[in-house]
Image: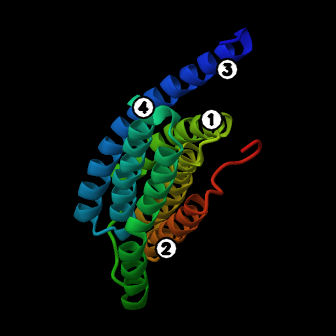
Amino acid sequence: MTETTAGVAGDRAFLVRRVKVLSWLSLGWMTIEGVIGVVAGIAANSIALIGYGLDSTIAGIGSLVIIWRFTGSRVHSDAAERTAQKGVAVTFFLIAPYIGVEAVRRLLTGNEAEGTWVGVGLAAVSIMLMPYFGYAKRRIGNRLQSSATAGEGIQNLLCGYLSLAILVGLGANAAFGIWWADPLVALVVALAAIHGGIRTWRGKACFDAC
């Protein structure tokens, strides 16, 4: 092995270790976020917050897929990369149908959610954490030429954007009683998940050098 080859191998090993650590950390947070989101959403009758919690749980599955992808002999496997890419894409699609249908139903029937400051606080914390995970995984995915990793990073970024949408929607409902903000935000969750899933399935999750 030449010095250059050894350097490339060492750099890849470092990136693999880093993305696994990031995936474990994001998995931990999204598990907490998912549980609190669903429980608070049920208590407040908020489809947006329930969808947000379920989306966080499913995003955690995406983190598990990346951990699987870069464990053992799969680190250098193109087949494992393709499987992980499809697996991450599927996680985007799991939540969209229920959230989309329920959001439309509530918009049509005027089924109101209660204001929930727990959801507002949860979203505020997520806004600070998820962009860090997302951008870091996307950069590593680009360097590893791993669409699965970049796709999971996009999923984390999506969680950050959805956190902002949730914060606006729940805040408007809690502070001003604007009930339709909740199902409207839920629709944003569903549409964004479908878009991210399609890009990842097609292997278009990488940016820049990928």
Mark toward the start of the polypeptide (2 vs 3): 3
Q: Residue at x 51, y 31 (%)?
A: 19
Mark toward the start of the polypeptide (1 vs 4): 4
Q: Nearer the viewer, mark 2 or mark 3?
A: 3
Identified by mark 2, the residue type is: Leu
- The residue beneath circle 3 is 8
Q: Vertically, is 10 above or below 141? A: above
Left or right of residue 165, residue 27 in this image: left
Distance, label 3 to label 4, CA atoms, is 18 Å
Q: Residues within 10 Å of mark 2 (few under 14, many from 20)?
A: many
- The residue beneath circle 1 is 144
Identified by mark 4, the residue type is: Ser
Identified by mark 1, the residue type is: Leu
Q: Residue at x 44, y 74 (%)?
A: 183
Distance, label 4 to label 2, CA atoms, is 40 Å
Identified by mark 3, the residue type is: Val
Q: Residues within 10 Å of mark 3 (few under 14, many from 20)?
A: few
- The residue beneath circle 4 is 73
Quadrant of residue 200 within the rendered picture: bottom right
